[in-house]
Image (cartoon, grey):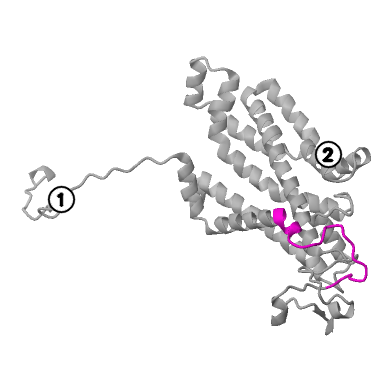
Amino acid sequence: MSMYDHEFQSNDFEFAHAAGEKLIDRNYSATSYAKDVWNNFKKNKGALVGAVIILIIVIMALIGPSMNEFTYKQIHGGQECLVPRIPGLEKLGIADGWHNGVDQYAEKGAKDVYYWFGSDTQGRDIWTRVWSGTRVSLIIALAAVLVDIVIGMVYGLVSGYFGGMVDSVMQRFAEILNGIPTLVIVTLLGMVLPAGITSIIFALMLTGWIGMERIARAQVLKVKEQEFVLASRTLGASKFRLIFSEILPNILGQVIVTSMFSIPNAIFLEAYLSFLGLGVPAPMASLGSLVSDGYKSMTTFPHILIIPVVVMAVLMLCFNLFADGLRDAFDPKMLNK
């Protein structure tokens, strides 16, 4: 008997819904791309925690230096290398000003003085200097993002869109710049410009945008031959409109993620240069210069080193977590990898 001669029985099928059940049409509201990104971002708990901690650190960098009576450069003779002492916690035996069995504050006649993070080798308040230094590091990080977007993104968009000889010349120029060590650039700039934030930002402007340029160019090469770009070109759209109105919105996710990943690199660059003595000049503080100063007293008074190291490590870790969350939010396929 062939398959066409099969005789169906009454129990071969059953109703999809129970008898008398009311069927209701369901309408699903359309969500915007930004909302989809936010919904995907919320699924990454590490990224949310990182974003919250970054916000807290930014707030502390803004208000922390003004939370006590000390300034970042004020020197207090006779109060050098005091360990942390915090009101309230000292009664619990935590941050009570004792070091090696000695009440340092009583010994140095500073019973009514509180250094929340302790004092450094010159008697300066570490609390104020840490948050002032965090402010400097965040300014450099913001400058790195602006350099990435203003120079790197535009350079990559133009190079990738026009292609041919224009792309070849622009890429060779970028490769020449990328071949110059950043340390050499900062050293040479230090001979022309005053050492500090200005020379570091100039170094970022010279070479810090290369990574963003490569990402933007690669994305443009992938997108520019797609149908919606061809349709706009056929309708007479200008090259400027094609680049910034058609292509850029479709690669914006990668641009944002790459710029977020550049922030920890910029913070580390500043710390590295400050550790070598090429960062911000004294008495101005940065996280890198604080680490450099604390390194000299690491064995005797480790709190001078540990506190800025912890703040810098947490800041860089949280930016990496935040960037990971953004990458997964803009590209949901990454969630399954």
Q: Magenta stretch containing residue 319, yes or no?
A: no
Residue 180's tag is 2
Mark 2, Cα crowd under 10 Å, few <14 / some 14-19 / many 20+, is: few
Position of residue 101 measured from the top left corner of the image (x, y, whole percent): 83, 85
Q: Vertically, is 155 above or below 58?
A: above
Q: Magenta stretch containing residue 66, yes or no?
A: yes
Position of residue 22 measured from the top left corner of the image (x, y, whole percent): 15, 50
Residue appearing at x 76%, y 65% in the figure: 307
The residue type indicated by label 1 comes to: Lys
Position of residue 308 measured from the top left corner of the image (x, y, whole percent): 77, 62
Residue appearing at x 63%, y 34% in the figure: 216
- Residue 181 appears in the figure: no
Q: According to the image, label 1 marks what residue?
A: 22
Indicate the secondary structure of the residue bearing disc 1.
loop
Q: Who is closer to the viewer here, 61 or 155?
A: 61
Q: Which residues are magenta?
A: 61-82
Residue 89's tag is none
